[in-house]
Image (cartoon, rainbow, N blue to C red):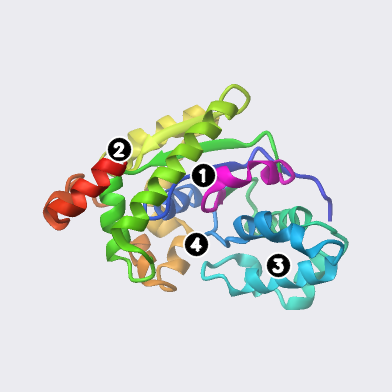
Amino acid sequence: MSDQKLIEPIILMCSERSGSNLITRMFDAHPEVAAPGTSHIMYVFSENAWKYGANHSALKRDLLDMFRAKISSWLIDAMPLDQLEAIIEDTDTAAGAITRLLQAELSATGKSIFFMKENSVHRFLPFLERIATRPRYVFMVRDPRNMALSWQKAAVMRGGIIRSAKRWVDDQTGYLRAVSWLENEHPVARLSYEDLIAEPEQALRRVCENIGLPFSNDMLEFNTRSRSALADAERAAVWSNLAQPVIANSAAKFASELSEDQLAYIEHLC
C-alpha cells in the first residue's frame, strides 16, 4: 500500500457538542466523501507518540488497540486484527500508521475524499501536515450557551457548564489563530451551527462552494444516506438523533433551560 498522503481531505474545526457529528454525517452522505465518526487516534497520538521513542511495535499495537476500541463505526472494523496489522506493518511513525488506516477506510467506501472529524484540531496542525496534502477546512461554531446546555444534558460529558464554557473559549481561540495562518494557503469555509439547522441547504451550498466541492442534495438526506449516521445512531445515546432529519429548533432555547447564574458565567467568559 502506498504511503501517499490523503489528497485534499476536508478537516473539520469544531468544538464538542457543537454539531460536529451532524455536519460529519451530512458530508458522509455526499457521493464523493467518506466521513466516518471520530476515532480520536489523531488527537491522542499526536500528543503522545513521542513517548514511545524507537519502540515502533508498541506504538502500533497501542494505536490499533485504541482504534478498535472506538465507539464510531468504520467499514474496516470488519477486518480481523492481522489484516489491520498488515496495513500498518511497515510504518514507523504514528502519522504513517494513521494515514494507512484512513486510506484503507477511504478505499473501502469506494469514495475519493476523506472528511476528518477530531477534537481540538488546532492543537496538532503540524501532525496533520504529515497526513494531508492540500487540506481544506470547515470551521463551525455554535453559540456557547447552546453548546453548554447540550454539554450539560449529555451524560458522558464531564464538568458541566464551567468546563464546557472554558473548552469553547480554548477551542475558538485556537481555531481563529489557526485560520489566520491557513486561509491564505488553503480553502476555509466558516459557518455556525445555528445557520446549519435553520437553513441547511443554503449553509451547505455555501460551505461546498468555499472549499471547492460540488454540492449534493444527498447531504440533506444524511439520516437515510449516510452509512455512519445509521450505524452510529444505535451505538451511543448522544448520537441517537443522527437517524432523524434536521429539526430547526429554537436557537435561543438556552434562555429557558439555563439559570441566570449559568448564563451570566457563560456570557462573561465567552
Neighbourhood count class around disc 4 (C-alpha, 10 Å): few under 14, some 14–19, many 20 upward = many
Q: Is residue 180 above or below residue 162?
A: above
Residue, x 48% and y 28% (percent of image)?
209
Which disc is residue 12 wearing?
1
Which amino acid does the dot numbered 3 rest on?
Leu
Q: Residues under labels 2 and 3: Cα distance?
A: 37 Å
Q: Mark 2 sits on what residue?
A: 195
- The one nearer the camera, 60 or 19, is 60
Provide the secondary structure element on which disc 1 rests: strand
Q: Residues under labels 4 and 2: Cα distance?
A: 23 Å
Residue, x 67% and y 54% (percent of image)?
46
Which dot, 2 or 3, sits closer to the camera? 3
Which dot, 3 or 4, sits closer to the camera? 3
Total marks in image = 4
Q: Residues under labels 3 and 4: Cα distance?
A: 22 Å
Residue 254 located left or right of residue 134: left
Q: Mark 3 sits on what residue?
A: 63
Residue 11 in the image: state x and y as whole percent: 56, 43
User: Does the CB distance between marks 2 and 3 fall below 8 Å?
Assistant: no
Residue 76 in the image: state x and y as whole percent: 66, 67
Which disc is residue 228 wearing?
4
Which dot, 1 or 4, sits closer to the camera? 1
Specify start and end residues of the magenta stretch as a single range: 116-131
Q: Is residue 171 above or below residue 104?
A: above
Which amino acid does the dot numbered 1 rest on?
Leu
Quadrant of the image occupied by residue 70: bottom right
User: Does the CB distance between marks 1 and 2 fall below 8 Å?
Assistant: no
Q: Is residue 130 magenta?
A: yes
Q: Is residue 166 above or below residue 80?
A: above
